[in-house]
Amino acid sequence: MSAAIRIFVPIDAAALSVGAEAVAQAIAREAQARGTAVEIIRNGSRGMLWLEPMIEVETAQGRIAYGPVMPKDVAALFEAGFQTGSAHKLRLGPVGELDWLKRQQRLTFERVGVTDPLSLADYRAHDGLKGLEKALSLTGGEIVEEVRESGLRGRGGAGFPTGIKWKTVHDARAEQKYIVCNADEGDSGTFADRMLMEGDPFLLIEGMTIAAIAVGATKGYIYLRSEYPHAHKALQRAILKARNAGVLGASVLGSGKAFELEVRLGAGAYICGEETSLLESLEGNRAIVRAKPPIPALQGLFGKPTIVNNVLSFAAVPWILTHGAKAYADYGMGRSRGTLPVQLGGNIKRGGLIELAFGISLREIIEDMGGGTLSGRPIRAVQVGGPLGAYLTEKQLDTPMDYEALAGIRAMLGHGGIVVFDDSVDMAKQARFAFEFCAKESCGKCTPCRIGATRGVELVDKIIAGTERPKNLAVLRDLNKLMTDASLCAMGGLTPMPVMSALNHFFEDFDRPPAPKLPLAAE
């Protein structure tokens, strides 16, 4: 009896949203009707979202991709012999030869789309747990030093050196320490955390466990946004399997060192992406930002020393421990070392996830890999770093993806999300949106953010309407300076970044004649 043909169908939320589940069912039905033995493996997405659902077939020549595949295409694919990689109009070719993937440097995402996300055996077969095994052979201080030497910086947005944060927790004296993962991925245009948690959940578990071993923590929490039900399910199942296999529990891989992990769901507040607000929520309190000092590394969850890192920060650590700090630091430029998972969205022809070494220009990402705008119209603005990131002009696209380079043009890298706009966008309305978003999502603790954002909406409305425009423009600039300087956290402090970039780069949108009032209908 011949072996079953292995067919990979993504279980990633983006693929599911365009029919991947129906495709998997159609393949199973068609194979049964034809008497063909198949094994359907639900993998993560490779990140080429414009080709989803993209299926892969394991052949003697390697894995062959087809996409985007709809249920109605399945019968014709079998008829054409796709089981052996035969020609079809949807055939994309060997996965490893696809240009989108060949141009990347996949370190953190090296397994996503390749393995069965919930198979620990598959994870181990692709070098999984090697980083944890290495960590268990080192002292806590040696692990921290390895992370420091790698140059890894927080991938959640702030870019703070991960090794310094870990050393602070390592050196703190306390009977209890915690590891907290910020998986409240709320920035517009970002989905890398979700893709990794759905496509390689054991990697996050391994990274957090290494952090625990490094600093002497025994308990960890993944704070996950409630809008990610598929990631929640994947993490819950992966944690259970890791516990049953001795990767988590009273003795991690038989080392005698304990670490337990659980997932906690947020309730949809953007402010919980700020670490102290997240900790308040984890403790069962209203999510309000804490004043600093003390910093969470010294007094974090329940007042104990706590590492709070983003999903991608923890997920980078196993590769660093497996291959060494120098190998990781060899990627990138300046003080931005390693790779960054870039998320490309908005008005873009080829949107998706790309993992690249720091230093590639925005233009290369958007025009070469993204294919330009989906509408075919010229690019007018690009927002980098989420809803609080700056709007950049087409002339600024040659800026490299680097923390300091972007800071040099009054922008920020954030979580690596890029949203593209064509020349039909109204940038005054985008500025208004930034204030409106802040007003709705503010925790309300500090006046500059709580009141400033509301006044900002009113000011932009007056400017758009042409009401005392010079005076209100002056007040708007003054308000932005106040919010930047006086807000308690980045929520209010960064809201002026998109507003001022829109005002400085696209002033003509704030200086248009007001729209004429329509006459009232006759009674």
Image (cartoon, helix red, strand yellow):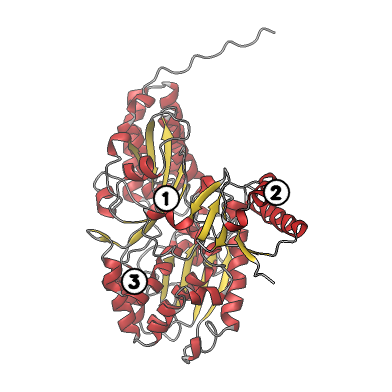
| Amino acid at circle 2 | Ala
Taking the image as shown, residue 297 lies to the left or right of residue 283, namely left
| Quadrant that contains the N terminus | bottom right
At 29% from the left edge and 54% from the top edge, which residue is drawn?
A: 403
Q: Is residue 5 above or below residue 75?
A: below
At 24% from the left edge and 60% from the top edge, which residue is drawn?
A: 335
Check disc 3: other Cα within 10 Å, few if <14, some if 14-19, many if 20+: many
At 35% from the left edge and 84% from the top edge, which residue is drawn?
A: 140
Decide which of tag 3 and tag 1 comes sooner along the chain. Answer: 1
Q: Is residue 517 above or below residue 352?
A: above
Q: Position of residue 310 (x, y in %)?
A: 43, 64
Label 3: state its secondary structure.
helix
In space, the residues marked 3 and 1 are separated at their CA atoms by: 35 Å
Front position in the image: 367 or 35: 35
From the image, state whether disc 1 or disc 2 is nearer to you: 2
Residue corresponding to mark 2: 75
Front position in the image: 172 or 225: 225
Residue 443, visible in the rendered structure: no
Residue corresponding to mark 3: 165
Identify the image quadrant of residue 130.
Answer: bottom left
Residue corresponding to mark 1: 100
| Amino acid at circle 1 | Trp
From the image, state whether disc 3 or disc 2 is nearer to you: 2
| Amino acid at circle 3 | Lys
